[in-house]
Structure formats: structure tokens, C-alpha cells
Amino acid sequence: MERYNAIGALDFAEQERFVAEELFGSAGVGASVQQGFNCDNGRNIHVGDHLIINYGCTILDVAEVTMGDWVMIGPHVLISTVNHPLSPRGRRNRLGVAAPVRIGDDVWVGGHATILPGVTIGDGAVVAAGAVVTHDVPPYTVVAGVPARVIQQIENDLGGWVEDELLEQEA
């Protein structure tokens, strides 16, 4: 983490190379991870194309974290795959349990949100800033609050033509 966070803030090519080749287990094209990023392992993180992780994100990847294409993670987001027992004895024994986190395509997680172990966030969903996600999020919904609850449905306005047009622009 120290080596990654020491890369120049404007050296986007080296940042992308480091994420894809040295930090994450796998990464698609166009992964942008801003400085102040922290994780436990890195190799348990698998991301698709065009990922954006804003400043100060922490991913506790004791278990696997997968993110689809076109995911946007806001500043100071916590994604945790690890939890501890409620029992004081269990905590004194430093016991932990882990469960994977899965984030679909086209998901936007707002700043200071927290995603807890075992959660799946469906395609196209939006997690509002400051939300604490304790349960799965259905596709194409907005969740907000503590704990996060569905507050709105989102129209799936992506058709094949949108993706094809974007791919042509990149070529």
C-alpha cells in the first residue's frame, strides 16, 4: 500500500499498471484508484472495466470482493468482508468470520458509505452517501440510511446501443 500510495498523483498509467499487475487479483481496463487507498490483501479484489475508486477508500478483503464494469466508489468508502463475534470471549480470542462482497455492473457507491460482509449489490444500484449496507441491494434501486433501505427504483436506461457507442469512442 505504501508503494502504491507513493505513485505520483498524475501518473495514471503507473497507477493503472500497479493495480492490474501488483495489487488486485484481477482488473479490467481503465481501473482508476485514487491515493489514500488501503486494503488487507489486494489479491482478493477482482474488478471489471472502467472502475473508479475515489480518495481514501478502504477494502478489508479477507474474503473475495468482486466488482463489475463501470463501478464508481465514492471517497472514504469502507467495504468489509470481515466481522467479529458479538461475544467478548470470541473477540478476546481475536476470532473473525469473513464473507465475500459482490458489486454488480454500473453501481455507484456514494461517499462515506459502508458495505458489510456477505452483501451483494445488484447491477445499476446506487448506494447513497453515508449509507450502511447490511443486506443485499436489489438491481436498479437506490438505498439510503442506517441500515440502508430501498428508497427508489431506477429505470434501466442502458440499451445495447449505449455500450456499443461508448466502445466505439474508446477505440
Image (cartoon, rainbow, N blue to C red):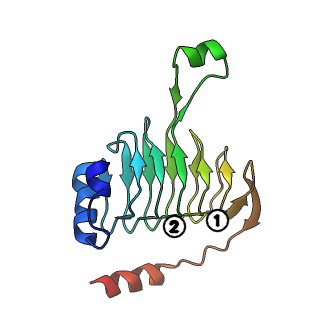
In x, y percent, where is residue 134? 67, 43
Mark identifier at residue 106: 2
- What's the residue type where badge 2 is placed? Asp
In x, y percent, where is residue 54? 46, 64
| Point 75% across, 66% down: residue | 152
In x, y percent, where is residue 15? 27, 63
Local crowd at mark 2 within 10 Å, few (<14), some, or many (≥20)?
many
Where, quadrant-wise, is the C terminus in this rendering?
bottom left
Image position of 20 (left or right of 149): left
Q: Examine the rendered structure and indicate whether residue 72 appears above or below residue 101.
A: below
| Point 59% across, 78% down: residue | 157
* Quadrant of the rendered image containing residue 43: top left
Image position of 120 (left or right of 41): right
Q: Examine the rendered structure and indicate whether residue 92 appears above or below residue 20.
A: above
Mark 1 or mark 2, earlier in chain:
2
Local crowd at mark 1 within 10 Å, few (<14), some, or many (≥20)?
many
Alpha carbon of mark 1 to alpha carbon of mark 2: how far?
9 Å
Depth check, front residue: 73 or 155 = 73
In x, y percent, where is residue 140? 64, 65
Assign a secondary structure to mark 1. Answer: loop
- The residue under label 1 is 140
Depth check, front residue: 74 or 118 = 74
